[in-house]
Image (tube, rainbow, N blue to C red):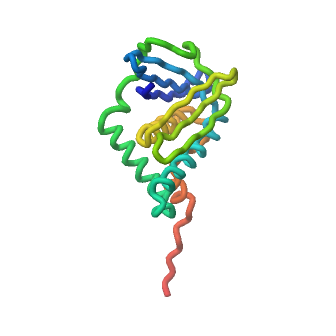
Amino acid sequence: MDLHQLQVTYQTNEDRVLLRVSFRAEDGTLEEIRAWLTRRIVKSLWPGILRSLDSLVKMTQPQAAHASSEILSMEYQASVTEIKASGNFDIPFEAAADRYPMGEAPILISSFKFQVDTQEPVRIAFSGAEDEKLEIGFTQKAMHGFCKLLQEAVRNAEWDLTLQMPSFAQQEAMPSPRRLLN
C-alpha cells in the first residue's frame, strides 16, 4: 500500500495528537488508520526522527557527514517549501475512506521503532497498547512534511515542547561570540 495522506492535529478534548494516515491500496480503495500520540510519545518520537534523518544523511552522503545537521536543515526547508508550493498542506484530508483496517476509533500508541536503510524510506513501526501495529514508510519529503505537521500540532497543544531541526536549535542555543578589538 502507498502512503496517500497524513493529517496531524491536536485534539483539545483528549489532550492528544490525532494522527490520521490514509493508504491507497492496489485495487484503488482508500484505507485509513487513526492513532493517538500522547505528549510522552511525541517527546521521545522527535529525537528518534532527527536521529533517523541524520543517519540517512550520513549513509547517503558520507563525505558530508560532518555537516549532517546543516544538510538536514536544508533538506527540511527545501521539502517544506516544495510541499507548500504544490499546495499539499492546503489539501483537506480525504474523510471518505473505504476501509478502516484497525477500526474507526484511534489506537493509542505506546511505543515505536525506527528502521533506516540506505535505499529504502525511513520506516516507523508504531505499536498500540493492545498489540496493534502501524508501520509507515516515509520518503524524505514525506518525513519532513510529517515533521512540519507534528511541529504545528505540538505548538497548538501548548505542551511546552520545542520541536526544532538540529542546526536551528544549535544556532539559538549557542551564544554569539563576543567581538574584541585588538
Counting labels gives 0
Residue displayed at 57% across by 26% down = 134
Q: Nearer the viewer, residue 23 or 177?
A: 23
Looking at the image, residue 77 sits to the left or right of residue 39; the answer is left
Q: Residue 4, percent across and down?
A: 41, 26
Q: Which residue reaches farthest right?
A: 130
Residue 173 drawn above or below residue 41 = below
Q: Quadrant of residue 48?
A: top right
Q: Position of residue 88 (x, y in %)?
A: 35, 32
Q: Quadrant of the N terminus?
A: top left
When the figure is inspected, residue 15 is found, relative to residue 76, above or below; the finding is above
Residue 4, placed above or below residue 45: above
Q: Position of residue 109 (x, y in %)?
A: 64, 27
- Which residue is situated farthest in the bottom direction here? 182
Kindly indicate the quadrant of the structure image that contains residue 127: top right
Query: Is residue 58 or residue 151 the one in the foreground?
Result: 58
Q: Residue at x 59, y 40 (%)?
A: 114
From the viewer's side, name the closer residue of 81 and 171. 81
Residue depicted at x 51% and y 56%: 58
Q: From the viewer's perspective, is 94 left or right of 85?
A: right
- Residue 18, position in %: x, y? 55, 25
Residue 19 versus residue 175 in the image, above or below: above
Front residue (pair 71, 179): 71
Q: Residue at x 52, y 33 (%)?
A: 153
